[in-house]
Amino acid sequence: MSDLIKPAFFITGTDTGVGKTFVACQLIRDYVAKGYKVVGMKPVAAGEDFINGEWVNDDVLKLEAASNVIAPRYLVNHYSFREPIAPHIAANAIFASNTSGLSITALSEGFDAELKARFCGVHFFNPPR
């Protein structure tokens, strides 16, 4: 791989607990084993535990442990919220989708009544320039 082109990965998933951190840590370990300098990042995290005198997110700790580059935590995890805020965990969260081509009713069919009441569609309109 060229020195000018560095591999970068963005791991995303549609739910809490689907394996995003697991996959990210595996990729990090694989690239570390190949000799790359690697740092895992979780720009936004929610749900912290008080460990060794500080509030930290478990996923952030796992990414830091897999990485071979030590970066300041404020760069690894810029926004961290003490309480979990996933829609099915936080009762006051609004759950939204920006998939304007799909029916909001169809998307919400599998939700229970409590979550369905907090579900909405968001449409981003980009006018021509």
Image (cartoon, rainbow, N blue to C red):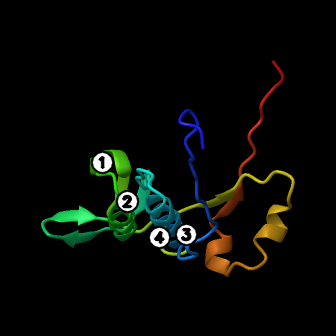
Mark 4 or mark 2, which is nearer the start of the sequence?
2
Q: Secondary structure at mark 1?
A: loop
**Closest to the observer: 37 or 25?**
37
Residue 53 position in % (x across, y down): 12, 66
Residue plotted at (77% across, 31% down): 126
Mark 4 or mark 1, which is nearer the start of the sequence?
1
Q: CA distance from mark 1 to mark 2?
A: 9 Å
Q: Residue furthest top?
A: 129
Residue kind at label 3, given as amino acid type: Val
**Closest to the observer: 50 or 8?**
8
* Mark 4 lies on residue: 90
Mark 3 or mark 1, which is nearer the start of the sequence?
3
Q: Secondary structure at mark 4?
A: loop
Left or right: where 52 falls relative to 108: left
Residue 37 position in % (x across, y down): 41, 50
Residue kind at label 2, given as amino acid type: Ser
Residue plotted at (34% across, 61% down): 64
- Proximity of marks 1 and 2: CB atoms separated by less than 8 Å: yes
* Mark 1 lies on residue: 71
Q: Is residue 14 visible?
A: yes
Residue 42 position in % (x across, y down): 44, 55
Relative vertical location of residue 18 with respect to residue 85 in this rendering, above or below = below
* Mark 3 lies on residue: 23
Q: CA distance from mark 2 to mark 4?
A: 30 Å
Left or right: where 48 falls relative to 32: left
- Proximity of marks 2 and 3: CB atoms separated by less than 8 Å: no
**Closest to the observer: 40 or 92?**
40
Closer to the observer: label 3 or label 4? 3
Closer to the observer: label 1 or label 4? 1
- Crowding at label 1, few (<14), some or many (≥20) Cα neighbours within 10 Å? some
Q: Secondary structure at mark 2?
A: loop
Q: CA distance from mark 1 to mark 4?
A: 30 Å
